Amino acid sequence: MKTRGIKTTAIVCLLTIFLLGGCSQKFQRGVKDFQSKWVGLKRKVTVYSASGEPVKIYEGRIDIEPTEYGNKIKFAHDGNMVLIFNMGVVVEELE
């Protein structure tokens, strides 16, 4: 009998934390970060030339790896690693 009460209390506590956490922006960002890292998000990456014209567009489940340099972007696309140096890049999340 005592074990059943502990299990019920634990379940209620976990559900409360989950429901309250779902309301916060920080929790939602954490879910997106997890999803991006392990599954990849459906994204559109547009690479622009110095004159502002689109050079290449990548679409699909893309996981972008953060780098320590502001002039480089690295991501996986269709099983291939893509590195872009010194180009304008816009990344959009598709729904």
Image: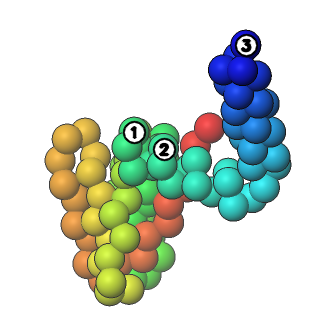
Q: Is residue 11 above or below residue 41?
A: above
State which tag comes first along the sequence, 2 or 3: 3
Query: Could you say which is closer to the camera, residue 81 or residue 2?
Result: 2
- The disc placed on residue 35 is 2
Q: Residue at the location (48% across, 44% down)?
A: 35
Q: Quadrant of the N terminus?
A: top right
From the top left corner, tell me how far across and down residue 66 is, in percent: 37, 70
From the top left corner, tell me how far across and down residue 81 is, in percent: 19, 54
Query: Could you say which is closer to the camera, residue 5 or residue 40?
Result: 5
Q: Amino acid at mark 1?
A: Val
Measure the alpha-carbon separation of dots 2 and 3.
39 Å
Q: Residue at the location (39% across, 65% down)?
A: 47
- The disc placed on residue 81 is none
Comparing labels 2 and 3, the label whose residue is closer to the camera: 3
Say whether marks 1 and 2 touch (CB < 8 Å).
yes
Q: Residue at the location (50% across, 66% down)?
A: 90
